[in-house]
Amino acid sequence: MDTEKVEVYLYKDKKSYQGGRFKPPAWSGGMVHHSGQPGSAWSLAIYEPLDKRIAAHELTHLYFRSFFKNSAGRIPLWLNEGLAEMMAEEAAGSGRVPASGPAVKKPSPLKDFLALRQVPDGASGEFYPQAHSLVRFLKKANSPLKFEKFCRQLRDGEQPGRAMFSAYGFMTTADLESAWKKWAARPAP
């Protein structure tokens, strides 16, 4: 993507964004779109007034896809959305999210969560905080080099479970889930 163009659609308001070219879901504040056709451009769609959080979220998707180059289809949904949420929160600089990430009231079992290919209908309020918390755990509670290694291995074709083991040493999804929940439950400093 580093040599591909990105078409930016800046709508005058939410109503024109929702009725625009990409027909986003009602809860959406912005989106990145690719037709899937080789050689076609990526599109970024957002609306005014520009929300720094949403812009950071959507730009993170573009940057992350650039890292994955021709393997963007290998990015797990939870990883893509979790990193975008984490970067959006950091760009906003609100200080609302503790070091352990957002509160996840009723987390989905990771074996199910990691397999998701799309955000469940009506569950965006539960999906995004869990993705954010899990990515924050992988990136911030561990060496950033481990996160980079994990992503590089995914990009290069490794299966997610093997990449997770190689980078972090988690033998099973249950091991990852246990470590993440323990980290997320610790008291804020």
Image (spheres, helix red, strand yellow):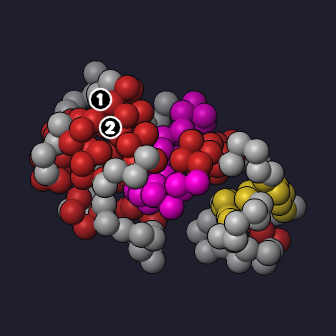
Which SS class for mark 2?
Answer: helix
Q: In which quarter of the image is residue 140?
A: top left
Q: In which quarter of the image is residue 2?
A: top right
The answer to if 84 sits in the magenta stretch is yes
Q: Residue at x 37, y 26 (%)?
A: 145
What amino acid type is highlighted by mark number 2? Leu
Magenta extent? 70-93
How packed is label 2: few (under 14 Cα within 10 Å), some, or many (20 or more)?
many
Q: Which mark is residue 141?
A: 1
Q: Which of 84 and 98 is in front in this view?
A: 84
Give the image quarter of residue 31: bottom right
Spot occupied by residue 129 in the image (x, y as percentages of width and height): 40, 52
Residue at 52%, 55% (x, y): give it: 71
Quarter of the image with the C terminus is top left
Q: Mark 2 points at which residue?
A: 138
Q: Distance between the residues labelled 1 and 2?
A: 6 Å
The residue lying at 16 percent from left, 42 percent from top is 170
Q: Nearer the viewer, residue 51 or 135?
A: 135
At mark 1, the secondary structure is loop
Tell me: 37 left or right of 171.
right
The amino acid on which the numbered mark 1 sits, given as a three-letter code, is Ala
Say left or right for 165 vs 82.
Answer: left
**In this view, which residue lies farthest toward the top?**
189
Q: In the drawing, what numbered circle is on residue 173? A: none
Question: Residue 64, percent across and down?
Answer: 56, 45
Task: Count neighbours of disc 1 (C-alpha within 10 A) and say few if under 14, some if 14 to 19, many if 20 or more.
Answer: some
Residue at x-position 56% and y-position 42%? 67
Asked whether the beta carbons under mark 1 and mark 2 sit within 8 Å of each other, the answer is yes
Magenta stretch: dominant secondary structure: helix
In the image, farthest residue toward the right: 12
